[in-house]
Image (cartoon, rainbow, N blue to C red):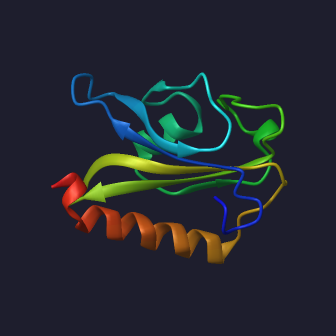
Amino acid sequence: REGLPGYDWVGFYLVDPVRPRELLLGPFAGADTDHRRIPFGRGLCGQVAESELTMVVDDVQAADNYLSCSMDVRSEHVVPILVEGRFVGQLDIDSHAAARFGPEDRRLCERICARLAEGPLFR
């Protein structure tokens, strides 16, 4: 969050081990959020949990099913974390700038999530 301009909120949502169709907020940096638990399918994070595909939204106000965390958020980037093909969590990044996330951001975040999936945290 501190190293990249426009990465205004950076956090992880992890699959709840007790309720496997819900995400729980894990470590994050940025403003506090009321969205500490998100059902699969709800909001952008819930959609990524179901699709298991990276989602980049240039204008969250135009997105269907968007859960607003802050009136300041303009764009969002959500990247799944898959361990041996199994969805275990995601990296969620919000920006106060519209269309903040480009191809370089996507590559960086997907590499980070792939590295996390290889590590001991999810094994």
Taking 105 as reference, is 91 left or right?
left
Foreground: 72 or 74?
Answer: 72
Q: Toward which corner of the image does residue 15 lie, by quadrant?
A: top left
Give coordinates of residue 91: x percent, y percent.
49, 52
Q: Residue at x 69, y 68 (%)?
A: 4
Give coordinates of residue 92: x percent, y percent.
55, 48
Q: Quadrant of the N terminus?
A: bottom right
Q: Residue at x 42, y 53 (%)?
A: 80
In the depicted structure, whether residue 98 falls above or below residue 68: below
In the depicted structure, whether residue 108 falls above or below residue 79: below
In the depicted structure, whether residue 42 falls above or below residue 14: above
Foreground: 61 or 96?
Answer: 96
Taking 45 as reference, is 61 left or right?
right
Q: Residue at x 52, y 39 (%)?
A: 45
Q: Residue at x 64, y 29 (%)?
A: 65
Q: Quadrant of the C terminus?
A: bottom left
Give coordinates of residue 79: x percent, y percent.
49, 56
In the depicted structure, whether residue 100 falls above or below residue 74: below
Taking 31 as reference, is 44 left or right?
left
